[in-house]
């Protein structure tokens, strides 16, 4: 006899749901094939790059709100920085005509390297060291009107003499405008206590900034064992210029100290010739703005210079290490910077 009433068993129940699942699977595959052949497969990121507004999809509401694509637990960072594009008709810059050992030009906004020569070669940096000295000094709660007595051998520089008494602010200006070694050493010893401890912090700060090829051994840069690369120095400059107290000082063209002990004035010019004009520019250039720079020189290093400049609303950093003369470090920085502005376009 045929049993027309199927008995409900666990086996039959499982078979029933397997059959239902198979039906849904077939329907799903068919729908997927239809979507693939007729639909828009553009990904979220592709649509974002095209600038389209994304509609709600499933339980994730996504839209381009100008600051990124945000929806549910999904966040897509916007692509805001435009990489400069080298003009098709540009002529390559021959870096071999430069006297500098290392050259680097980098776009500030995108971080793109626009021109380079030995950017990762290690090089003695001399007084560019003082950018890190300044950064670490700003970590202290300093009363800039307090005074201290200058220390250091006369051979360090002639901007001031041991026994002179100046305010911390005056020493700060002398250190960054005229690159006074005695000013740097006197500030550090007075505020921190020992140069050695201060240098430990300088190297720690370098690690924090990701300066993997940079080592400091003194606070002035007088030792040839203060080592870095053009690639690292760009990062150091950018961090320094983030601090208004550093940037504003680097842009001062001149400064005058008065020694009560010697009853004598001492006038100092900035070591950055790109910002000087008396009455004509010391170094002619076509940049709209110079935003700050620092020089360095000892025999082992040659003539070094790092600077940020702007033209047409675009900012670039330029590093020159090991030029063969004081003037060459500025003219070579100018020449590579102007070549970049002449040969690259920043697409809006």
Image (cartoon, rainbow, N blue to C red):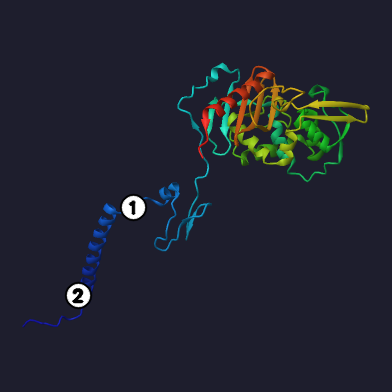
Q: Is residue 201 left or right of residue 19?
A: right
Q: Decide if residue 119 is in sight here.
A: no
Locate the N terminus and report the quarter of the image it occupies.
Answer: bottom left
Mark linked to residue 281:
none
Q: Is residue 270 left or right of residue 86?
A: right
Residue located at (63% from left, 26% from top)? 286
Q: Residues within 10 Å of mark 1 (few under 14, many from 20)?
A: few
Q: Nearer the viewer, mark 1 or mark 2?
A: 1
Q: Decide if residue 59 is in sight here.
A: yes
Viewer-nearest residue: 143 or 308: 308
Q: Residue 323: name its quadrant.
A: top right
Residue located at (26% from left, 56% from top)? 34
Q: Residues within 10 Å of mark 2 (few under 14, many from 20)?
A: few
Which residue lies most toward the left here? 1
Residue under circle 2? Answer: 12
Residue located at (66% from left, 23% from top)? 330
Of mark 1 and mark 2, the one earlier in the sequence is 2
Pinpoint residue 41: horizontal percent, then vertical percent: 34, 51
- Secondary structure category for the residue under label 1: loop
Viewer-nearest residue: 111 or 221: 111
Q: Residue 174: name its quadrant.
A: top right
Residue under circle 1? Answer: 40
Pinpoint residue 160: horizontal percent, then vertical percent: 85, 27
Distance CA(mark 1)–CA(mark 2): 42 Å
Asked whether the beta carbons under mark 1 and mark 2 sit within 8 Å of each other, the answer is no
């Amino acid at each position: 006899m045929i049993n027309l009433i199927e008995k409900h068993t666990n086996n039959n129940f499982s078979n029933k749901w397997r059959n239902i699942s198979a039906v849904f699977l077939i329907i799903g595959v068919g729908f997927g094939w239809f979507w693939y052949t007729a639909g828009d497969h553009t990904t979220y990121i592709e649509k974002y790059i095209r600038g389209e507004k994304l509609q709600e999809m499933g339980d994730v509401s996504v839209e381009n709100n100008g600051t990124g694509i945000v929806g549910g637990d999904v966040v897509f960072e916007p692509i805001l920085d435009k990489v400069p594009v080298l003009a098709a008709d540009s002529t390559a810059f021959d870096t071999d005509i430069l006297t500098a050992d290392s050259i680097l030009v980098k776009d500030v906004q995108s971080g793109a390297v626009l021109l380079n020569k030995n950017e990762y070669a290690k090089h003695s940096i001399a007084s560019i060291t003082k950018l890190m000295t300044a950064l670490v000094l700003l970590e202290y709660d300093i009363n800039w009107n307090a005074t201290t007595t200058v220390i250091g051998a006369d051979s360090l520089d002639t901007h001031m003499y041991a026994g002179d008494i100046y305010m911390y602010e005056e020493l700060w200006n002398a250190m960054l405008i005229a690159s006074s070694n005695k000013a740097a050493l006197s500030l550090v010893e007075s505020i921190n206590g020992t140069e050695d401890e201060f240098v430990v912090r300088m190297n720690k700060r370098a690690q924090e900034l990701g300066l993997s090829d940079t080592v400091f051994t003194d606070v002035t840069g007088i030792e040839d064992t203060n080592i870095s690369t053009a690639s690292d120095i760009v990062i150091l400059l950018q961090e320094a210029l983030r601090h208004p107290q550093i940037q504003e000082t680097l842009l001062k063209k001149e400064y005058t100290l008065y020694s009560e002990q010697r009853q004598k004035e001492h006038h100092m010019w900035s070591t950055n010739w790109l910002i000087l004009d008396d009455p004509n520019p010391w170094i002619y250039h076509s940049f709209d703005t110079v935003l700050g720079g620092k020089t360095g020189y000892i025999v082992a290093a040659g003539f070094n210079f790092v600077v940020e400049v702007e033209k047409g609303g675009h900012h670039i950093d330029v590093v020159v290490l090991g030029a063969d003369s004081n003037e060459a470090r500025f003219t070579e920085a100018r020449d590579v910077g102007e070549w970049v502005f002449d040969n690259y376009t920043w697409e809006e």
